[in-house]
Image (cartoon, grey):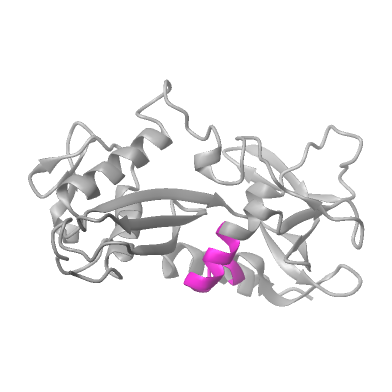
Amino acid sequence: MMNTKTITGGFALLAGAVVLLAGCGAPPPPAGFAPGQRSEAYAYVHGGYVGMALVTTGDDGRISTHVDEAFLPHTLAIVDIDSSEWTRENTESYQVRGNEIFVARHVSYQGKPYTAVSVGTALAYVAADDQGNPVGNALLDLEILRNQETMAQWFHGIQEGAFAVHQSFGGDPLPVTSTAYGGVTKRDSTYWSSGGSGLGWEANMNAIQDAAERIGSGFQLDEITRGNDDRWRLADVVTRATASDFKDYFGLIQAAVGRLKMK
C-alpha cells in the first residue's frame, strides 16, 4: 500500500530542499583564477528540472560559462495516447494547466524499474517490485535530486539513453532520446524559443552567462534585483536577462565558480 503522505511530502521537498540560491560572499574578479580549470554545479531549478552550470578558466584566468537544464521523468515519459502502442491500460496521467498529460506507467532508470502513481493531479514514479507494483516510498525524482553526484548522473545519463519507457512491465526498454521539444535537455530543444514572449530560454541563458563573464559572480542576494523593465540587475549594472528564475541560474554559476582555485 502506497503512503500518499510520503509522496506528497516528497513533492514539497523537491520545491524547497534542493534549490541553490545566489551564493554568499564575493569571489575574486573574473580574471583572478588559476588557468585550465573546469567546475560543474547542479541544482533543482525552475520548478521541475535539473540545472547544470559548467565554468572553465582560460589561460588568462577569465571564466567561460555554460548553463543547461535536463528534463525530469514526468516530461521524458510523455507518450502519445492516440497511438496504438499506448492506452489507458499502460499509461498514467497528470494535469498541467487543465490539460491531461499521459505518460508511460512503467519506466526504468539505469535498469531499475519504477511505476507511475497518481497523487491528485500530480504524478510520481516509485520503485517497483517484481510484479511491477509500487513498493515502499522510493521516489525516482528524489533519488535523482539527492546530491550533486546523482544529479550529474541523471543529466549526463539520459543523454546516453539511461532512462527508458516500457509498454508493459518487463517489456523491452525503449530508451528516451527525444521529447516533444526536441532533445532531453533544453539546449538541445526548442523550449521557449525566441520570437514569442520575452527573449526565449536560450537567449536568457546566454544573457546570464554573459553577465557572469563580464561583470563577475560575486553578488549577494540583495544585490540581484529585477527592474520595472523585467531586466535583472547585478548591483547597479543592468543585464539583458529577463527570465523569472534568474537567481536559480546565476546561483548555479556562483556555485561552480566557488569551487575554482585562485591564481
The residue positioned 40% from the left and 49% from the top of the image is: 67
Seen in the picture, residue 120 relative to 80 is either above or below; the reply is: below
Give the residue displayed 28% in from the left and 68% down from the top: 260
Q: Which residue is found at the position 43% from the left and 22% from the top?
A: 196
- On screen, residue 151 versus residue 245, left or right, reads right
Residue 105 vs residue 255, the one in the foreground: 255
Residue 144 sits inside the magenta stretch: yes
Q: Position of residue 19 (x, y in %)?
A: 40, 63
The answer, for residue 138, to whether it is visible in the render is: yes
Work out whether residue 71 or residue 257 is closer to the camera in this orientation and state it: 257
The stretch of residues the image draws in magenta is 143-155
Most common SS among magenta residues: helix
Q: Position of residue 226 (x, y in %)?
A: 20, 43
Q: Is residue 168 magenta?
A: no
Residue at x 25% of width, y 56% of height? 59
The outermost residue toward the front is 59
